[in-house]
Image (cartoon, rainbow, N blue to C red):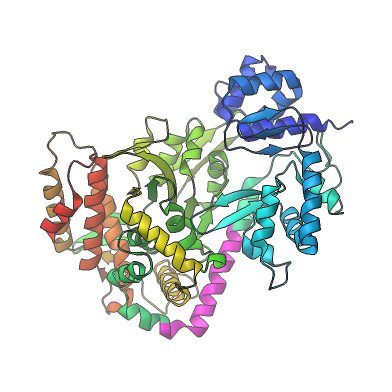
């Protein structure tokens, strides 16, 4: 069969430029029979939908589609036949330009340029500096090479956080670069679909692949825990006897300042909560556990990605060491919500943390609110598509997400159009980011210190990571520590409940209206946060339980007051309430 690479490029371009719901509308308008089978865009398979359109339209029709429907403005496409950049479609390819530009880069950087490109092409995914440096001499800095390749449109930035960046080769550009680098092109896949030699269109078994991934993460945890038990057990216990929520807060304040620290405090405390430890009182069980989902939202460039991703997973290129539990944080960058729902089945009866950057993107797909609501309630998920039924299964993990909002003088407006999105926010610990002068100064100072090597958090990060890993292993009864340390639930005290009650009364008397804009779930999350933060005290006493600590409750009340203020469109000042309470 003759391979029509124009069709495949159109398919890839359409899929990248438009969400599934738009592809469905485009297919319906073009009267393509495939789309008559479905009631909504959510039911159609994204790969098949894009391919059906691509194989049925001409270049003239493609141009009209882009004129009528709003493509994702941030999308870049540089193919052999089509180019999409800066929001404009061009019915001509970019390969000729890229080939000429590549010649310039090779002439300037020679072998180092080839080594960088080879790493990116062979990986086929986004790479940070750490991966790219592997094929370079130690004295070679790849940053100027990457900057030049990006300027020449050979590579693109795939992720850029406050202190970390990744680059990649566009899928449609990869065949050209493989040819220019003298690499062997893969044989055409055996499929009835029209595909070029380097692009394979097939339905991936995401569930099988994810189960393999879970196995790797389990192995990572076991290896790190083994190393800890053999070499650092006594030092970790000694560290734990002096460690507390206040100690963690002081450590983070010294690093990042009095505003930025609280976001990192939330992320690290959430790691302790992943053990999902029972919360009890003096009379018995409460039915609550320590785990909760976290959302940082607000204006771009306010440090959300750093707190939710970099601090937990670590970024060696920027001298940020990981503080999170090894093998228990699943990064979801670039993942679609449909894939999230599919792979969730690999985590049945397991508790992991799913780190989701740019949570907004998941709500470009119809029908996600109810499914994510169930996920955050640790409920039973079932979703029926045209060709498959996902579930039912119970999702018992948690999410750590960030997303952008429009922030005003008082209050904010989410950029998610679904009116039911508040139901999602209501099920997470939420923290609003406003780019105040003080936050701006602290971000700038932290960036400067990191750039100059003035912040060295390796020792502190290792101590904290060892401690949270050991506490997690003990409280989840991991086989490597079972029998060596007792499982301890967290006991909520009357004093803690009184502090939360006093906060509630102080908040309500400052809200002039009868209607309250936040739900009682906020107090539930306050208690869970306080109990998760109290797990830092595991080694403080010989009790068969961990009493909720006063300093943990103080930070929990601060979170309660500040979130209540944001939800109430800042009708009261948190500082006034906290001053009254403490």
Q: Tell me: 302 left or right of 391.
A: left
Please, which residue is most extreme toward the right here? 1
- Residue 96 position in % (x across, y down): 81, 39
The quarter of the rendered structure image containing the N terminus is: top right
**Residue 274 visible in the snapshot:** no
Camera-nearest residue between 142 and 403 = 142
Camera-nearest residue between 391 and 139 = 139
The quarter of the rendered structure image containing the C terminus is: bottom left
Above or below, 241 relative to 340:
below
- Residue 519 position in % (x across, y down): 24, 41
Q: Residue at x 66, y 15 (%)?
A: 30
Q: Residue at x 54, y 73 (%)?
A: 224
Q: Residue at x 68, y 21 (%)?
A: 63
- Residue 308 position in % (x across, y down): 44, 56
Magenta: main secondary structure equals helix
Please check the rendered image and state whether residue 86 is part of the magenta-colored stretch, yes or no.
no
Above or below, 527 relative to 454:
above
Displayed quadrant of residue 530: bottom left
Camera-nearest residue between 285 and 300 = 300
Q: Residue at x 71, y 47 (%)?
A: 152
- Residue 460 position in % (x across, y down): 42, 75
Q: Which residues are magenta?
A: 214-235
């Amino acid at each position: 069969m003759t391979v029509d690479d124009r069709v495949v490029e159109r398919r890839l371009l359409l899929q990248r430029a438009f969400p599934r719901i738009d592809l469905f509308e485009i297919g319906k308008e073009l009267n393509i029979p495939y789309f008559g089978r479905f009631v909504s865009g959510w039911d159609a398979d994204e790969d098949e939908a894009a391919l059906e359109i691509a194989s049925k339209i001409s270049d003239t029709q493609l141009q009209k589609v882009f004129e009528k429907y709003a493509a994702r403005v941030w999308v870049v496409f540089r193919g052999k036949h089509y180019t999409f950049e800066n929001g404009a479609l061009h019915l001509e390819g970019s390969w000729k330009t890229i080939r000429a530009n590549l010649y310039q880069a090779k002439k300037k950087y020679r072998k180092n340029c080839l080594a960088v490109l080879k790493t990116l092409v062979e990986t086929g995914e986004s790479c940070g500096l750490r991966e790219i440096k592997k094929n370079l001499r130690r004295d070679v800095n790849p940053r100027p090479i990457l900057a030049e390749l990006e300027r020449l449109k050979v590579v693109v930035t795939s992720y850029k956080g406050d202190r970390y960046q990744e680059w990649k080769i566009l899928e449609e550009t990869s065949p050209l670069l493989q040819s220019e680098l003298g690499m062997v092109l893969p044989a055409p896949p055996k499929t009835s679909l029209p595909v070029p030699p380097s692009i394979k269109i097939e339905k991936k078994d995401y569930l099988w692949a994810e189960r393999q991934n879970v196995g790797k993460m389990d192995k990572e945890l076991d290896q790190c825990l083994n190393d800890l038990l053999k070499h650092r057990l006594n030092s970790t216990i000694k560290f734990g006897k002096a460690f507390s929520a206040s100690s963690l807060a002081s450590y983070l304040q010294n690093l990042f300042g009095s505003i930025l620290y609280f976001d990192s405090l939330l992320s690290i405390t959430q790691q302790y909560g992943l053990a999902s430890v029972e919360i009890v009182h003096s009379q018995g069980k409460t039915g609550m556990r320590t785990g909760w989902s976290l959302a940082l939202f607000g204006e771009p460039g306010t440090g959300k990605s750093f707190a939710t991703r970099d601090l937990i997973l670590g970024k060696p290129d920027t001298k940020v060491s990981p503080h999170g539990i090894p093998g228990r944080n699943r990064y979801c960058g670039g993942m679609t919500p449909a894939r999230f729902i599919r792979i969730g089945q690999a985590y049945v009866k397991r508790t992991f943390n799913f780190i989701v950057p740019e949570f907004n993107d998941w709500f470009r797909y119809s029908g996600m609110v109810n499914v994510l609501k169930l996920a955050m309630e640790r409920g039973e998920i079932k979703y029926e598509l045209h060709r498959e039924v996902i579930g039912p299964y119970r999702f018992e993990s948690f999410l750590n997400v960030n997303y952008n909002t429009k922030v005003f003088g008082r209050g904010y407006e989410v950029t998610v159009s679904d009116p039911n999105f508040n139901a999602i926010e209501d099920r997470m610990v939420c923290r609003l980011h406003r780019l105040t002068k003080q936050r701006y100064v602290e971000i700038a100072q932290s960036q400067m210190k990191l750039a100059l090597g003035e912040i060295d958090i390796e020792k502190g990060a290792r101590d904290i990571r060892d401690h949270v890993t050991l506490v997690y292993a003990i409280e989840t009864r991991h086989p490597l520590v079972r029998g060596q340390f007792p499982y301890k639930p967290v006991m909520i005290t009357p004093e803690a409940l009184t502090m939360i009650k006093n906060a509630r009364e102080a908040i309500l008397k400052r809200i002039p209206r009868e209607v309250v804009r936040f739900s009682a779930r906020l107090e539930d999350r306050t208690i869970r946060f306080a109990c998760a933060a109290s797990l830092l005290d595991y080694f403080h006493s010989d009790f068969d339980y961990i009493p909720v600590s006063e300093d943990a409750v103080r930070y929990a009340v601060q979170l309660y007051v500040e979130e209540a203020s944001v939800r109430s469109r800042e009708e009261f000042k948190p500082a006034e309430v906290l001053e009254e309470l403490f």
